[in-house]
Image (cartoon, grey):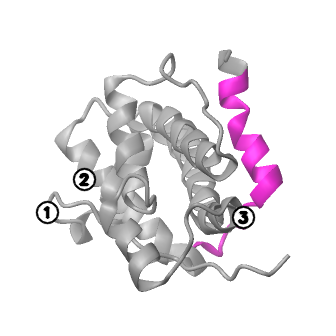
Amino acid sequence: MQKYQFEKIYSQMEKEFGKIRSGSENDHSVMLFPMESNLLKTHRKYPSSNSRRLREAIALALFDAKARYTSTEIPLDNFRNEDNAKLEHALLMAFDPFTNEDIRTALVKQLDMDITDLTVLHEYYREAIICMLRIKESVDTWEKRMGANGYFDFVENTIGSQITGEDMNFTVVVPEISEA
């Protein structure tokens, strides 16, 4: 995979899933807050995992989700490094049942969701994907305004006082899946 193909994931996912309209972020806070919380905790612990590495981590996490709901292997090792991998993991810990065992348990045992069904996974990942796309837009905006660490400076100033501890937060959003 070439860098161009790697970076094209944002527009591909937006075309497939849509995006969060500006001003409606509160409607998605159940997913956005755990993601941003995990990202800020990771950045605090590992400052080299900065806003620029976050853009790469979002692409990696989008590819991770796509690989899971399409049951395909996508070679990403050439794009993964120590700094973006930490942020990728922080994102996935907020929603991914293949990364976070607590989420898997909640979905499978408590909600009886079949996470082997690709249609179910596609719908399950929808909210996480549009939230990651919104975070990427925010990264782009704050990097332009405040520099290489603009996104994390912004998040620290807006919700930083609410983010404590080092445990990774997560959320389980149960999608309504229509019968085919």
Q: Please tell me whether residue 3 belongs to the stretch shown in magenta.
A: no
From the top left corner, tell me how far across and down residue 58 is, in percent: 52, 42
Q: Left or right: where does residue 74 sit relative to residue 30?
A: right
- Which residue is under mark 1? 165
Q: Residue at x 42, y 52 (%)?
A: 92
Q: Which of marks 2 and 3 is nearer the N terminus?
A: 2
Residue bounds of the magenta highlight: 5-25
Q: In this view, does 135 lie above or below 176?
A: above
Do tag 2 and tag 1 residues touch (Cβ < 8 Å)?
yes
Q: Depth check: 123 or 129 in front?
A: 123
Farthest residue, direction right: 180
The image quadrant of residue 126 is bottom right
The 10 Å Cα crowd at callout 3, few under 14, some 14 to 19, many 20 or more, is some
The Cα atoms of the two marked residues, 2 and 1, are separated by 8 Å
Q: Which residue is drawn at 43% across and 61% down?
A: 97
Q: What residue type is labelled 3?
A: Thr
Q: Depth check: 15 or 155 in front?
A: 15
Q: Is residue 22 above or below residue 89?
A: below
Do tag 2 and tag 3 residues touch (Cβ < 8 Å)?
no
- Which residue is under mark 3? 119
Q: Callout 3: helix, strand or loop? A: helix
- Front position among marks 2 and 3: 3
Report whether residue 173 is seen: yes
